[in-house]
Image: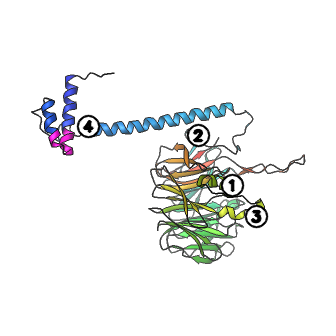
């Protein structure tokens, strides 16, 4: 189908082409085209309306094409989600459906109230409660079912970088750039009951170790410290890196820690001794986060990398929960590692910004990541493909968490095995637009 241009449109197009040829240095072609297009009186002029027009139009078309492809993908995903919902029996409870994934639709709730970036989100293990930590030096407690803010927790004087509830939800721990770690009594209106002093620079992360009697922290002072909750004493100091340690995350059994650092590496160290067990080198920029892959993710990982991993009986399978590590980096990549050898097994590529948040789906078949490209991506582990992208439409995504509350697990009255407890389906992300966002069925 031919498109007819008016004389004026032809003239503008020819002049835009001449401007491009001259600017790009195609001088012979420029002179020849001037003659063939009857533009012998044309002289390059940066003030002309056609100056740079061809390049601008071209880049605009590319951007529009990308948006169209993205919208088509999101529409197809939305149609697929709707079809899935339509074919599921009405009795299926999506709240505890073990295969639930968030859809590409906007988040169910947007929690507003902070006056600065949200750096961390932490779910209560028993109740529909979420805590957010912010650059505004406060934490806020929310009901994630309703979006209602229940209280503001104050006590730090600078950025609150991380927070976490213990396994029973009795205490909340927080770390700040004011160099202090604080413990808050949940049942006593979040009263500050202890302060841990010892770090010489900003605190990056704080986590309870299994048993809730110790805390592990990572800091810009290049140290990982173990603290005794009962006495607030620092009982161990490890220096696995020579630069700012961005995170120190314990394994499920607490025997090991995985650290990530500004030096572009991550390490696995022993909690008891600080001895290095593995080092992961391969990222081209700061490693922002690192987590152990859960045991139920091992079959999908094995399928992805072609390993022949035979799952031992449950009683002997604890080592599998520390067999693999996933790292997120400012080089926009996510890498999967063998935690025993330090070998990079696979690289997930798709984000267009620094990657911060990492969380495994409770069923072990998917990995979720949050990045500075204002998106959450869902990766199918067995194929290494990004199967879904949640666009937040806002600024940088700083953190990501899956709800800790469980459903089921009670003994069956007919003598059959008890139903396995299932994690409640709710996801929270912290953003630099001063909000936290909630996805749920």
Mark 3 = which residue? Answer: 316
Instruction: Point out residue 412 in the picture as x, y percentages from the top left corner.
Output: 86, 48
Say if 351 sits above or below 268 in the image.
above
Task: Determine whether label 2 and label 4 are within 8 Å by CB.
Answer: no
- Please give the name of the residue rendered at 65% of the width and 45% of the height, measured from the top-left corner: 145
What secondary structure prevails in the magenta region?
helix
Residue marked by disc 4: 54
Mark 2 or mark 4: whose residue is earlier in sequence: 4
- SS label for mark 2: loop
Mark closest to the chain's N terminus, 4 or 1: 4
Indicate whether 281 appears above or below 129: below
x, y percent for residue 329? 49, 59
Circle 1 packing at 10 Å, graded few (<14), some (14-19), many (20+), is some
Mark 3 or 4, nearer chain start: 4
Q: Secondary structure at mark 1?
A: helix
Percent position (x, y) of residue 58?
Answer: 31, 38
Question: Do the CB atoms of the residues marked 3 and 2 lie less than 8 Å apart?
Answer: no
- Residue 400 visible (yes or no): yes
What's the CA distance linking mark 2 and mark 1?
A: 23 Å
Q: Which mark is residue 296?
A: 1
**Magenta stretch encompasses residue 305:** no
Picture quadrant of residue 8:
top left
Q: Which residues are magenta?
A: 19-29
Q: How many angstroms separate mark 2 from mark 4 (CA)?
A: 39 Å
Label 4's element? helix
Instruction: Tell me which residue sits at (34%, 21%) in the image.
Output: 1
Disc nearer the start of the sequence (3/1): 1
Q: Could you tell which of marks 2 and 1 lies nearer the N-terminus?
A: 2
First along the sequence among labels 3 and 2: 2
Q: Quarter holding the C terminus?
A: top right
Q: Say which residue label 2 marks.
A: 103
Gap between marks 4 and 1 measured at Cα:
54 Å
């Amino acid at each position: 189908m031919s498109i007819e241009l008016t004389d004026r449109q032809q003239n503008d197009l020819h002049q835009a082409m001449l401007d491009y040829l001259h600017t790009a240095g195609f001088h012979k072609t420029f002179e020849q085209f001037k003659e063939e297009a009857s533009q012998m009186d044309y002289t390059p002029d940066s003030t002309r309306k056609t100056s740079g027009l061809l390049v601008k139009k071209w880049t605009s078309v590319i951007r529009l094409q990308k948006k169209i492809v993205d919208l088509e993908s999101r529409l197809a995903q939305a149609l697929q989600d709707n079809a899935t919902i339509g074919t599921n029996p009405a009795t299926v409870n999506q709240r505890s459906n073990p295969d639930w994934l968030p859809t590409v639709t906007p988040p169910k709730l947007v929690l507003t109230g902070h006056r600065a970036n949200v750096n961390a989100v932490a779910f209560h293990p028993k109740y529909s409660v979420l805590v957010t930590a912010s650059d505004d030096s406060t934490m806020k407690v929310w009901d994630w079912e309703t979006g209602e803010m229940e209280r503001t927790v104050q006590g730090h004087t600078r950025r609150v970088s991380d927070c976490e509830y213990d396994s029973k939800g009795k205490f909340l721990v927080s770390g700040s750039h004011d160099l202090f770690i604080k413990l808050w009594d949940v049942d006593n209106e979040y009263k500050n009951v202890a302060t841990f002093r010892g770090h010489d620079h900003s605190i990056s992360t704080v986590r309870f170790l299994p048993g809730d009697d110790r805390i592990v922290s990572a800091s810009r002072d290049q140290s990982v410290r173990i603290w005794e909750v009962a006495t607030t004493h620092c009982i161990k100091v490890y220096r696995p890196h020579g630069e700012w340690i961005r995170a120190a995350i314990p394994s499920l059994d607490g025997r090991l820690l995985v650290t990530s650092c500004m030096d572009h590496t991550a390490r696995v160290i022993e909690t008891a001794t600080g001895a290095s067990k593995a080092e992961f080198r391969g990222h081209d920029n700061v490693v922002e986060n690192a987590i152990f892959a859960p045991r139920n993710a091992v079959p999908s990982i094995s399928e992805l990398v072609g390993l022949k991993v035979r799952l031992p009986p449950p009683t002997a399978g604890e080592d599998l929960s520390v067999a693999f590590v996933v790292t997120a980096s400012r080089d926009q990549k996510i890498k999967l590692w063998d935690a025993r050898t330090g070998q990079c097994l696979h690289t997930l590529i798709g984000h267009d910004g620094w990657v911060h948040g990492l969380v495994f789906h409770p069923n072990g078949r998917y990995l979720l990541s949050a990045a500075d490209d204002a998106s959450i991506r869902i990766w199918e582990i067995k194929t290494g493909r990004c199967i879904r992208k949640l666009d937040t439409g806002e600024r940088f995504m700083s953190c990501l968490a899956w709800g800790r509350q469980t459903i089921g697990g009670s003994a069956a009255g007919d003598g059959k095995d008890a139903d396995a407890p299932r994690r409640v389906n709710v996801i929270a992300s912290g953003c630099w637009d001063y909000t936290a966002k909630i996805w749920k069925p």
